[in-house]
Image: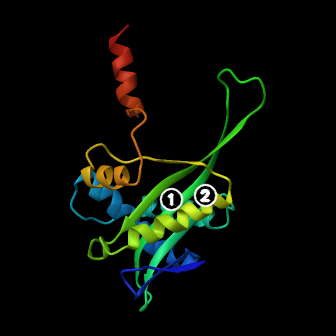
Amino acid sequence: MTAKVKNVDQVSIRAAQDTDLPVLVDFLAKLALHVAGSPPHTLKEKEHNRLLATLRSSLSDPAKLIVVAQTSDERLVGMGYLYVWRSQGIWEQTADVEFKSGIIDDVWVEPDFRKLGVFSAILRELLAFAESHNIGELILEYAASNKEAAATWAKLGFKPTGVRAAAFTAVVQEALAKRR
């Protein structure tokens, strides 16, 4: 799989390889900092190694796909990650039913390559992978504060379907202790 980006002749989309992983970890860090609105900084070694191991295990998993956008001079300028999520229908089902969704876990395009078709090319590859796995539904998550992501995904037909709340376990423990 190698797809050319329409608006940028020097960029192609391909499956990620092991040698790409250090750059992909940097992309994930940039994405997290972008969402948090934090200035750039280096990941701690333990977190870097954890992300590296997670991505490495995904490369050989047939239910996961990581693609990269690469320039003609072999510089990586974007990535996309999708995995197959299987769940059983449990509400009002008379038979066993397996539902498959494609979870778009992370998409990143370097700022200088945005609005050039790189994102769309990455998404096309992820969508082709999902369709090859008979997935009819795509699910993704983005921070509510990330207005750019919200607008981009909405243009593609994604609609918020619920609210995901998060809390640190220590905060929940403290709140429960106050209720005694």
Residue 59's quadrant in the figure?
bottom right
Q: Quadrant of the C terminus?
A: top left
- Residue 144 at x, y = what percent? 30, 42
The answer, for residue 53, to whether it is visible in the render is: no
Whether residue 70 sits left or right of residue 82 in the image: it is left
Q: Nearer the viewer, mark 1 or mark 2?
A: 2
Q: How is the image coloured?
A: rainbow
Q: In whole angstroms, how far apart are the C-alphas of marks 1 and 2?
A: 26 Å
- Pick whichever of labels 1 and 2 is earlier in the sequence: 1
Whether residue 17 sits left or right of residue 10 in the image: it is right
**Residue nearest the observer in this picture, 149 or 49:** 149
- Helix, strand or loop at disc 2? helix
Answer above or below: position of 64 versus 162: below
**Residue nearest the observer in this picture, 175 or 128:** 128
Instruction: Residue under label 1, please give it.
Output: 50
- Residue 158 at x, y = what percent? 42, 47
The answer, for residue 75, to whether it is visible in the render is: yes
Instruction: Residue under label 2, please give it.
Output: 130
**Residue nearest the observer in this picture, 22 or 80:** 80
Answer above or below: position of 71 versus 79: below
